[in-house]
Image (cartoon, rainbow, N blue to C red):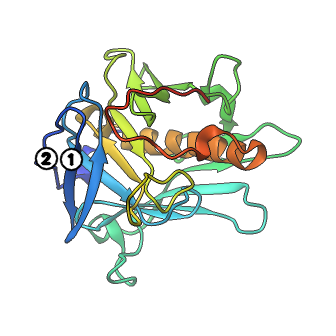
């Protein structure tokens, strides 16, 4: 599925080596950090909360593109929906007021394997059969999935961000996730900022898969944060420090 039609915006900023790119989102400036090796982003979406479990994914004009919900009782059933209520007008639904439609759902289970189902699949599949790392587990990191016969891999980039690569351009990310100060991994020296997903055209065209896989990755990594108090609590460095980390 080509999701590029969701975007009616782009950024005019140029990513300068070892510096920040300032983007304007409905009067609010946000800062996107990227290594010098990355191209300028084509577009950026933001997350209304600091958790991927329950949030609205917003365009630069604050239009709701997706809604992500997780049940409050078991915290095990996540739905990714296209569209959602506007932050300015909760009665107005997003994606050009087309309403909400299911994109995918993820079910985490204790005794049985976790499962995932995209809306156009006839049935659910084991989560690890769609996305997995070297050991074959969905909780692995780095982790890979296939979409339209092409392999994509989430791993860390040189700025210690979670970044998505494909086999065509294995050294240049097509998307990367930048944690804001409202998340568990805030950038130092900044007031509250939103989590951002920075996108190149290759990622825009498969945004459903990019977002759903990011939810899987972030849920797994943040669960490990909580369980093991891992090094992911260390704040992200500024670009140019050229530090690396492992998960």
Question: Where residue 131 sits: x, y (%)?
Answer: 59, 29
Give the SS element for disc 1: strand
**Residue under pointer 2:** 13
Look at 38% across and 84% down and name the residue there.
91
Residue 200: mark? none
On the image, which quarter does residue 198 sit in? top left
Q: Is the Cβ of the residue at disc 2 closer than 8 Å to that at disc 1?
A: yes
Quick one: 118 or 181, which is closer to the camera?
181
Q: Is residue 227 left or right of residue 45?
A: right
Of marks 2 and 1, which one's residue comes earlier in the chain?
2
122 vs 53: above or below: above
* Count of residue discs: 2
Measured as percent of width and height from the top left, residue 117 is found at 61, 43
- Picture quarter with the N terminus: top left
Outermost residue to the left: 12
Q: Is residue 133 visible?
A: yes
Rendering quarter of residue 158: top left
Which circle, 2 or 1, is nearer the viewer? 1
Say which residue label 1 marks: 21
Disc 2 versus disc 1: distance between alpha carbons? 6 Å
Point 10% across, 48% down: residue: 12
* Residue in front for this viewpoint, 121 or 28: 28
Give the percent coordinates (x, y) of residue 103. 49, 51
Spot the residue most to the right: 111
- SS for callout 2: loop
**Badge 2 local density, few (<14 within 10 Å), some, or many (20+)?**
some
The image quadrant where one finds the C terminus is top right
């Amino acid at each position: 599925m080509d999701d590029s039609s969701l975007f009616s915006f782009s950024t005019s900023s140029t990513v300068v080596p070892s510096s920040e790119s300032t983007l304007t989102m409905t009067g609010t400036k946000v800062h996107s950090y990227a290594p010098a090796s990355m191209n300028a982003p084509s577009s950026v979406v933001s997350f209304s909360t600091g958790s991927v479990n329950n949030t609205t994914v917003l365009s630069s004009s604050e239009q709701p593109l997706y809604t992500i919900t997780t049940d409050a009782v078991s915290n095990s059933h996540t739905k990714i929906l296209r569209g959602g209520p506007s932050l300015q007008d909760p009665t107005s639904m997003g994606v050009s007021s087309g309403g909400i439609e299911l994109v995918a759902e993820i079910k985490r289970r204790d005794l049985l394997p976790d499962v995932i189902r995209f809306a156009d699949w006839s049935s659910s599949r084991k989560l690890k059969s769609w996305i997995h790392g070297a050991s074959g587990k969905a909780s692995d990191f780095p982790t890979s999935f296939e979409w339209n016969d092409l392999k994509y891999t989430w791993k860390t980039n040189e700025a210690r961000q979670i970044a998505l690569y494909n086999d065509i351009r294995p050294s240049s990310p097509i998307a990367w996730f930048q944690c804001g100060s409202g998340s568990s991994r805030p950038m130092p020296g900044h007031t509250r900022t939103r989590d951002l997903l920075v996108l190149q055209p290759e990622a825009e065209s498969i945004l459903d898969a990019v977002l759903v896989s990011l939810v899987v990755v972030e849920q797994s990594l943040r669960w490990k944060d909580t369980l093991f108090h891992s090094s992911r609590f260390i704040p992200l460095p500024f670009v140019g420090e050229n530090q690396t980390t492992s998960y």
